[in-house]
Image (tube, coloured by chain):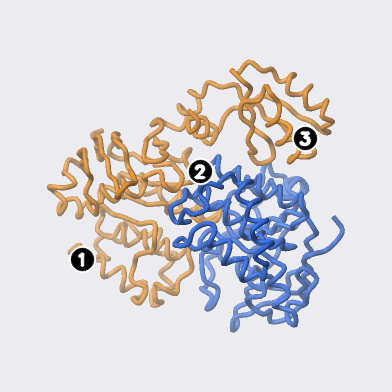
């Protein structure tokens, strides 16, 4: 497998803000690659550079071998892009939007219907409705259909699941897996750490930098700290007590449990337990727990 | 936690023939952290607008902070705070100017404002930034500030609409520290989120689906009832994803 996307030492600043700082990585052909990070990580800026919508200050990037500056016209024919903000024509119908994008790329809806059928079929009953009047989930499906209508080799999706509920998010990722099976390279960004596990590889990003790049499994395996899950009847008091314990390094809420690390990773479970029992915590549980991608990310943020 | 600060009986809201809220019944207690969950389009935003006095129900009895939502709408508004991910503070005003602006709206005297402002800036450790434009602050600061401003007038209830979207995992957790602190002070927190781990931090959660409340209990009981490992599983079991026709009025990404 060759490289679909190659990024070498890309930097970009807006006035005094360094949005992207010397980023380099490659995405293989047919890969589902995730950019994982919070707002301000530089995900959108990087994507816009790859989409030839923004010119980098430094570095070089290619999409299927084409240079993002020199060959921008060629790139625009082989990429599909779904920006973070809904950017279809709100005053055109579903059908009109799709036809418009097909025409712009000198193709027809019927020619590439196979590619979008599974997605488009769900909104087809509403094809006469104005795009602006669609529900959030339907807008998302239309935007994806429009991004695919010219059969792109590389699909770039900027936070397609932000603000989307857990059920719809799951469905959206199932759609992406199907597109990947059809041979499309996919670059997708998300602030939801749990979605990292659905990608082949991910780049963890923060403040314009890549913290790490690997498969989700390797990222978790390479986490070297000793992590405990701790729970008690009074969770808020537990948080406060753990933070004021001199042997605690980090203590963060993770759903039902706290995820806790000790100083130098030399603190035993029993030490936490004894300390918390002295503080009169009831229904106390302390046990070893494997890390999640979010633990990995938070650990890297602190380095 | 016996004092009821939100009482909802048979709340119905219709837009034409579409029923956005279908006979909702629930109470929320003083100091409680109440998670208001549901799929996109389930009717959460519609219900929240009614509770904030921004939209009238079609039928049903609703009391918020002890006031009738039909007759005492203005009193309701004075006794609640509101913060969303999208709108919270004016980016082109400084921190101090934002505080002055919101104090004016809620009728806080200049003397009280000054004293309270000092406490707020000290608690958030942003005294040195008080004359900085809000737009220039990091997102994590903005959200903490927005929350502190939303409860600046000591409301009985604060409504938070997806307050933690887009922030990094550490900041997201620090934001919940503020929620816990507010709850300890007796402020009721009514919060929506798409992060299911955050549902676990609530005292009770309700899950809406197609305009109805399908489940309402502590997370512990819900997990037992639905034989689920975590709230994510509970949510997936309850909130079947139904693409409903769009509604004319409610805007946003509910």
User: Badge 3: few (under 14), some or many (20 or more) residues near its Cα, within 10 Å?
Assistant: many
Q: Is residue A150 above or below residue A281?
A: below
Who's orange, chain-wise?
A
CB under 8 Å between discs 3 and 1 = no
Q: Is label 2 in a helix, a strand or a loop?
A: loop
Q: Which residue is mark 1?
A: A104
Residue A45: x %, y % from top left: 32, 48
Q: Quadrant of the N terminus of chain A?
A: top left
Q: Quadrant of residue B54?
A: bottom right
Q: Chain of mark 2?
A: B
Q: Quadrant of residue A96?
A: bottom left
User: Badge 2: few (under 14), some or many (20 or more) residues near its Cα, within 10 Å?
Assistant: many
User: Can the viewer see residue B202?
Assistant: yes
Q: Which residue is mark 3?
A: A232
Q: Is residue B72 above or below residue B8?
A: below
- Seen in the image, is A224 located left or right of residue A50? right
Q: Chain of mark 3?
A: A
Q: Is label 1 in a helix, a strand or a loop?
A: helix
Question: What number is the disc on residue B168?
Answer: 2
Q: Identify which residue is drawn at 21% across, 40% down.
A: A58
Viewer-side residue, B35 vs B74: B74
Q: Is residue A29 above or below residue A277?
A: below
Who's blue, chain-wise?
B
């Amino acid at each position: 497998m060759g490289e679909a996307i190659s990024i070498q030492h890309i930097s970009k600043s807006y006035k005094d803000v360094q949005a992207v700082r010397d980023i380099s990585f490659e995405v293989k052909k047919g890969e589902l690659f995730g950019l994982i990070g919070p707002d301000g990580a530089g995900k959108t800026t990087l994507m816009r550079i790859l989409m030839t919508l923004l010119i980098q200050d430094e570095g070089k990037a290619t999409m299927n071998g084409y240079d993002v500056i020199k060959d921008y016209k060629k790139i625009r024919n082989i990429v599909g892009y779904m920006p973070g903000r809904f950017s279809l024509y709100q005053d055109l119908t579903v059908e009109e939007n799709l036809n418009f994008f097909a025409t712009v790329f000198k193709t027809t809806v019927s020619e590439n219907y196979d590619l979008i059928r599974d997605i488009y079929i769900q909104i087809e009953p509403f094809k006469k409705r104005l795009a602006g009047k669609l529900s959030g989930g339907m807008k998302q499906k239309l935007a994806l259909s429009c991004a695919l209508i010219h059969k792109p080799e590389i699909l770039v999706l900027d936070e397609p699941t932000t603000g989307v509920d857990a059920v719809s998010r799951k469905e959206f990722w199932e759609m992406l897996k199907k597109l990947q099976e059809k041979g499309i390279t996919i670059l997708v960004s998300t602030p939801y750490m749990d979605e990292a596990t659905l990608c082949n590889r991910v780049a963890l990003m923060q403040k314009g930098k890549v913290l790490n790049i690997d498969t989700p499994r390797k990222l978790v395996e390479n986490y070297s700290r000793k992590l405990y899950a701790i729970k008690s009847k009074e969770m808020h008091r537990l948080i406060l007590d753990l933070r004021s314990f001199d042997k605690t390094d980090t203590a963060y809420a993770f759903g039902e449990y706290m995820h806790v690390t000790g100083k130098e990773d030399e603190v035993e479970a029993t030490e936490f337990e004894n300390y918390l029992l002295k503080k009169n915590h009831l229904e106390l549980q302390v046990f070893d727990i494997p890390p999640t991608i979010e633990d990995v990310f938070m650990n890297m943020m602190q380095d | 936690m016996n004092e009821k600060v939100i009482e909802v009986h048979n709340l119905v809201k219709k837009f034409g023939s579409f029923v956005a809220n279908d006979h909702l019944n629930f109470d929320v207690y003083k100091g409680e952290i109440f998670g208001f969950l549901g799929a996109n389009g389930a009717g959460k935003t519609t219900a929240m607008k009614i509770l904030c006095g921004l939209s009238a129900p079609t039928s049903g009895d609703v009391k918020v902070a002890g006031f009738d939502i039909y007759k005492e709408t203005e009193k309701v508004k004075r006794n609640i705070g509101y913060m969303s991910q999208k709108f919270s503070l004016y980016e082109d005003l400084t921190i101090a100017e934002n505080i002055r602006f919101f104090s004016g709206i809620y009728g806080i005297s200049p003397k009280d404002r000054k004293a309270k402002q000092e406490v707020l800036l000290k608690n958030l450790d942003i005294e040195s930034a008080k004359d900085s434009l809000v737009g220039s602050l990091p997102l994590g600061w903005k959200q903490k500030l927005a929350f502190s401003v939303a409860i600046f007038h000591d409301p009985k209830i604060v409504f938070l609409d997806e307050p933690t979207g887009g922030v990094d995992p550490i900041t997201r957790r620090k934001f919940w520290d503020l929620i816990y602190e507010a709850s300890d002070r007796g402020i009721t927190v009514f919060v929506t989120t798409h992060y299911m781990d955050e549902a676990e931090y609530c005292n009770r959660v309700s899950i809406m689906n197609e305009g109805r409340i399908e489940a309402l209990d502590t997370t512990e009981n819900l997990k037992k009832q639905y034989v689920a490992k975590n709230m994510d599983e509970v949510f997936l079991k309850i909130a079947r994803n139904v693409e409903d026709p769009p509604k004319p009025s409610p805007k946003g990404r509910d």
